[in-house]
Image: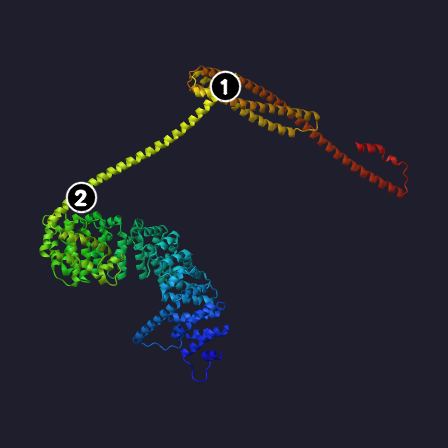
Amino acid sequence: MNFLRGVMGGQPAGPQPTGAETIQKLCDRVASSTLLEDRRDAVRALKSLSKKYRLDVGTQAMEHLVHILQTDRSDSDILGYALDTLYNIICNDEEEEQDESEGAAAPVPASGKHKSVPDESAQKQAEDMGVLFTDKFIQDPENVTLLLALLEEFDFHVRWPGVKLLTALLKNQCSQVQGVILVSPMGVSRLMDLLADSREVIRNDGLLLLQQLTKGNAAIQKIVAFESAFERLLDIITEEGSSDGGIVVEDCLLLLVNLLKNNSSNQNFFKEGSYIQKMKPWFEVGDDNSGWSAQKVTNLHLMLQLVRVMVSPVNPPGATSSCQRSMFQCGLLQQLCTILMATGVPADILTETINTVSEVIRGSQINQDYFASVNAPSNPPRPAIVVLLMSMVNERQPFVLRCAVLYCFQCFLYRNQKGQGEIVSTLLPSTIDTNSISAGQLLCGGLFSADSLSNWCAAVALAHALQDNLQQKEQLLRVQLATSMGKPPVSLLQQCTNILSQGDKISRRGSKAQTRVGLLMLLCTWINSCPIAVTHFLHNQDNIPFLTGQISENLGEEERLVQGLCALLLGICIYYNDNSLENYSKEKLKQLIEKRIGKENFVEKLGFITKHELYSRAAQRPQPTFPSQEHMLFDHEFTKLVKDLEGVITKAVHKSSEEEKKEEEVKKTLEQHDSIVTQYKELIREQDAQIQELREQVGTLAARSDTLETTVTQQQAQILQHKDQYNILKLKLGKGEPPGGGQGGGQGGGQCEGVPPMNGPQMEVLLLREELEELWTRHTLLQSQLEERDTLVNTLGSEALSPETSAGSEHSELTQELEVLKDQVQTQAAEISRLQTERQDLLQRAEAASSARVSSDEGSAAVAELESRLAAQTTETERLKEEVRVLAEGRAGQDQQLASSGSTAAILQAEKSRLETELLESRREQDDLLMLLADQDQKITCLRGRLRDLGETIDDEDDLDPRDPSEEEEEEDD
């Protein structure tokens, strides 16, 4: 401890040890001390020296510090000191050092030029040192695993430095640390738990850690996403105030961009989880947009970038279109358009919003249609497209804003033939409105203005209105322009070629080459795949000489690109020439190239386009992003056109007339062959359809065959059964059994052998069937009526009970009679059911007998027997009907008797109630009289007593009360 006091505080006697010696002694103390307090003090001392003597501490103490992390897990203080020390020697950031030394630091010189180089070299040296110590630490992967385990400690002094240390390791050696964390069990899940920490410092540093962890590793990005990262991050953004939040919102947005960018799986998960809908409130801006803070601008910029990540053109087309559809359905696109047309929005946010809207509508017809309907809040209202084009052709607008508007216009027309037609229609004579500014007028104005950037942007925009749309290319040939007073109008195509041929008169401001490149790209796109436009172009006698003259000249480096584009334009005139003009047929143009230019020279000049340094940059992505106006030469879609045409034009120029004839013959042969093949394909399709139809018919017939086979099998089984029944019936008839026992046999014989058709039995069977159904219906009705009357009798019986013996005995007799009637009816019902069953059997046998054809005598005898049985059954049925009728009449009489007895019982009951009421009233009156008599007796007794007291003599006491006591008792008894 004395040694530590000397190191940390007091002035030791004698010479002071150097920093390296002090660190060596501290490391020995950490390694050899048995007391935890000594080791803790030594590690604390190493922490204090780790910034000043970073190299020495990192070289000598790292192994001891890692050992502390492994062995002293129970003490949070020593763990915190060790982690802080490791962070100081691995981290390259100097922020903490600067914060600590701010008060004592010397003022910075006015001119920092002399310190810039040493600062850069020192920073580079510090970064190298951090990478060196990081490599040493992660040389053993168990160290990273140990650090992940320490992050589970809830103690602030352990968890926070652990988070910072792991972040520093990821900054220095990202891929190696990512690999260790990826294979560590629950490694990513432990880090995701940091977002749920209630201490904001740890949560915020956890965001920084996850930012470093998810850089460039799709596997970790997927794991983090499926650990509910999207939901947690969006909740944090909402809690912090969305776009009005602080640096925490920015960190969350950066992490979301890391998780979604170039990761189609996470993008699909984000969309399927309905998280796009939660982004809409971010872009709700008020009417007063003044005073935007720098942090709000940064946050909103990242939010727009996150939307662009979801709909980026580099994403799979299916995923992009799905996200575009979701953004329109949830109203996100509408919210972005509101920002687009709002006032007071900062310029960089407006530019990024335009780029975002561009990619949201790119290739989506429904989104493009909505954008075409958006109007700016002006008086009178103008379409948003027109307002944006006004900014594009205005040279006073910022360069990046004009590029963004051009990109928006390109995305609006991308695969949108409807929009292309609307733009071109604003240039046609029949649709021009002189009272309002249209998109076509703005494009023409920009195309022929004095600003070269406006020329280029308008030419590219108009080329996109013609991209892959033959109809609009032909329609644009109708556009006429009035050049000056007194001169006839010229076509737009002719005016473009006239400007090209004027040379130095093209532009007074900007690059002359930029204007010429823009016009040549427009002409190449216009006449490509359009023989009519090629004919119109060749019809001008000055165009071909101008092109050949430009190609054949030996110009400087700046004009080589123009020569290449002229060669491309001339090659398109050859390739898509329909030979309608004799002087400019394919053969004549090739001869002209061979004489004036040379085929090899022509191909060489054509190759200047793809060899240009800006060509490859423009071919990488659709958005026109240029560092300056001078680099703005190529359009992305035009690079695709050049790639498609360069090879075919080279072949077309090198072909001779004979080769062309042979090629035309081969082409015609191929066309004939193709037509024959098409005919055969149609025939094969028809035959396939017929075969399919026949197969379906075969399947249907097979199913019907199976059904019929099943039916035949069932019928055969029934026939065998009937044969057996018929044999049994023959045996029974041979033994002379009564007809009632041979019903089954007779039916079986009739079914098997068959009987001649007889109309009489059939009619009788039908009549019997109808009568039986009617009888059963009546029986059901009688049964229901009987049940209702039983219920009524039971009710009356319970109400009609009276003390009179005669009424009770009569009711009991009626009840017994009703029970007897019930038994009889049930017996008759059972008999009717049995007869109905037998009747049904007879009907079935009669039907079988009528449908079968039996020519034998036995069949006739069976039919006669059946007829006799039917007659017997009919007689029995009539008898039963009569019995049921008699029973019903008797039941009706009994019901009447029961009703009369019930009424008598009710009268007696009423009389009894009246008598009881009178008796109660008389008893009540008698009680009142008794009470009066008792009062009178008491008064008489009092008066007698008073008379005696006064001396009066009472001779006969009985005179006052002439009643005898026995009579009173009799009255009381009464």
Task: Name the residue carrying label 2.
Answer: 670
**At x 40% / y 30%, what residue is drawn?**
710
Relative to the observer, which residue lies in front, 448 or 561?
561
Q: Residue furthest left?
A: 595
In this picture, residue 859 sits left or right of residue 799: left
Quick check: 640 above or below 844?
below
Relative to the observer, which residue lies in front, 59 or 564?
59
Q: Secondary structure at mark 1?
A: helix
Instruction: Give the colour scheme shown.
Output: rainbow
Q: Please state the horizontal and vertical placement of residue 345, each as a whole percent of the image.
A: 33, 60
Q: Please state the horizontal and vertical placement of residue 486, each as a whole percent of the image.
A: 13, 53
Quick check: 824 above or below 341?
above
Residue 497 visible = yes
Badge nearest the viewer, 1 or 2: 1
Crowding at mark 2 (Cα within 10 Å: few <14, some 14-19, many 20+): some
Crowding at mark 1 (Cα within 10 Å: few <14, some 14-19, many 20+): some
Task: Name the residue carrying label 1.
Answer: 731
**At x 36% / y 66%, what residue is drawn?**
173
In this picture, residue 93 sits left or right of residue 871: left
Sequence-first tag of 1 and 2:
2
Q: Please state the horizontal and vertical placement of residue 381, each as a whole percent of the image.
A: 29, 53
Relative to the observer, which residue lies in front, 308 or 295?
308
Q: Please state the horizontal and vertical placement of residue 183, each as a whole percent of the image.
A: 40, 60
Quick check: 115 above or below 420?
below
**Res. 306 image quadrant:** bottom left
In this picture, residue 264 sits left or right of residue 789: left
Amino acid type, callout 1: Leu
Amino acid type, callout 2: Leu
Residue 791 image label? none
